[in-house]
């Protein structure tokens, strides 16, 4: 038998006695009152059904908690399922003294060592400090009063044997988020088959104490994740906030409302509105991925909203076909096939040929192209044949 393990037989004998005396009480309730995970106790009982209990061992901490659990500590029908309790004040004063003398200790560490939930201990400390009468289970009070600082400090300083360094996992998370848009920690955790709250809790603990690690199996799953599925999408480093704003406006010019764009990109119209109306817009990875996804889905077809199209025309927003994928993110490039009265550059044959060629390649007739450019047939003819008289 390993030195850090103890025989399970006495523990099982005691637990079976408690179960026999409280047949209506779930095993999970017994485990909870002992401060032991219900899965641990159920596994202990299940493993010994097919073989002698002497073959099974448990940790000394679990054995101590189960053996110290008395029948009077468990709820029963006759007492309304109430347990044996005692005044919490002496135990809480002891806890306060431990916390004051050893700042490195946390309430959660003390609660775990006594087999209590951290929230129960925190509530008891608060009530006693406020002078409110408070009672706690007698077994928990005895375990709190028996706590000594040295073992607690040692346990807080030593990482659990089933954990590993968290910093490599954090670095890997950041690398994935740099490679992918819309790659939140929760999405990465779900993709790796990890509970998002488990990862969030580990990251929070690490921020408070860098020595805190993460479970080996959880860390291995996260580190093994190299590719992310949709809705995460590979980050395009050349995409700018200017380009995103142009894409939004172009989709509106094509007849799509912000609600339509938000639905296509799985983002709220309120978020899109806030981005589009900010004086100096700054995008987030989630917004960038959403706008790009909506652009891929909607830019090649007209939208149903005449109001959105009319509003965009009044604001002189260029439609999708006026932009090239290679230049839409360049703030120095203007849309093709669009001329505004504020642009005072004079027409010349080369410029007009370029604009007409672009628009006709998009499927417009020459008359439609001239209307788009704000030119009449006679003036276009003068520009092409007599550029000096065109002004």
Image: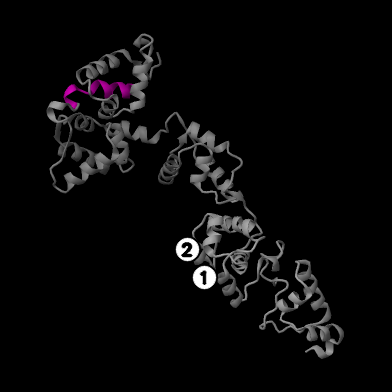
Disc 2 to disc 1: CB gap under 8 Å: no
The front one of 116 and 109 is: 116
The front one of 76 and 176 is: 76
Residue at the far right in the pictured view: 385
Tell me which segment is drawn in magenta.
59-73
Looking at the image, is mark 2 or mark 1 earlier in the sequence? 2
Quote the CA–CA distance across marks 2 and 1.
Answer: 11 Å
In the drawing, does residue 223 fall left or right of residue 124?
Answer: right
Residue on which disc 1 sits: 277
- Can residue 285 be seen in the rendering of this structure? no
Q: Residues within 10 Å of mark 2 (few under 14, many from 20)?
A: few
Disc 1 secondary structure class: helix
The front one of 29 and 111 is: 29
**Whole-percent x, y for residue 139 in the image:** 20, 28
Hey, which quadrant is residue 40 in on the image? top left
Hey, which quadrant is residue 147 in on the image? top left
The front one of 119 and 350 is: 350
Hey, which quadrant is residue 95 in on the image? top left
- Can residue 223 be seen in the rendering of this structure? yes
Disc 2 secondary structure class: helix
Q: Is residue 84 above or below residue 303?
A: above
Residue drawn at x 27%, y 34% is: 116
Residue drawn at x 57%, y 67% is: 305
Residue drawn at x 36%, y 26% is: 39
Residue on which disc 2 sits: 270
């Amino acid at each position: 038998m390993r030195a850090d393990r103890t025989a399970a037989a006495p523990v099982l004998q005691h637990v079976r006695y408690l179960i026999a005396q409280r047949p209506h009480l779930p095993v999970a309730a017994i485990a909870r009152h002992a401060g032991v995970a219900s899965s641990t106790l159920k596994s202990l009982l299940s493993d010994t059904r097919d073989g002698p209990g002497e073959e099974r061992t448990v940790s000394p901490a679990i054995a101590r908690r189960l053996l110290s659990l008395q029948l009077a500590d468990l709820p029963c029908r006759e007492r309304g399922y109430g347990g044996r309790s005692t005044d919490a004040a002496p135990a809480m004063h002891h806890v306060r003294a431990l916390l004051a003398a050893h700042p490195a200790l946390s309430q959660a560490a003390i609660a775990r060592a006594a087999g209590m939930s951290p929230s129960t201990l925190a509530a008891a400390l608060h009530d006693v400090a406020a002078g409110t009468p408070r009672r706690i289970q007698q077994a928990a009070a005895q375990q709190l009063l028996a706590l000594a600082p040295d073992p607690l400090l040692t346990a807080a300083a030593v990482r659990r044997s089933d954990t590993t360094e968290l910093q490599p996992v954090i670095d890997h998370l950041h690398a994935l988020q740099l490679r992918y848009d819309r790659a939140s920690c929760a999405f990465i955790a779900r993709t790796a088959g990890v509970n998002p709250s488990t990862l969030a809790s580990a990251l929070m603990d690490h921020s408070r104490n860098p020595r805190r690690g993460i479970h080996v199996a959880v860390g291995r799953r996260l580190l093994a994740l190299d590719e992310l599925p949709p809705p995460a999408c590979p980050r395009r480093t050349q995409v700018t906030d200017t380009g995103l704003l142009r894409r939004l406006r172009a989709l509106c010019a094509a007849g799509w409302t912000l609600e339509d764009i938000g639905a296509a990109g799985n983002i709220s119209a309120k978020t899109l509105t806030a981005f589009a109306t900010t004086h100096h817009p700054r995008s987030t990875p989630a917004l960038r991925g959403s706008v790009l996804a909506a652009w891929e889905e909607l830019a090649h077809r007209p939208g149903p909203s005449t109001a959105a199209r009319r509003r965009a025309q009044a604001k002189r927003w260029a439609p999708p076909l006026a932009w090239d994928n290679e230049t839409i993110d360049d703030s120095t490039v203007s849309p093709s096939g669009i001329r505004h009265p504020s642009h005072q550059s004079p027409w010349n044959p080369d410029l007009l040929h370029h604009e007409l060629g672009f628009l006709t390649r998009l499927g417009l007739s020459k008359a439609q192209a001239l209307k788009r450019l704000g030119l009449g047939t006679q003036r276009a003819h003068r520009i092409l044949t007599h550029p000096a008289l065109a002004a």
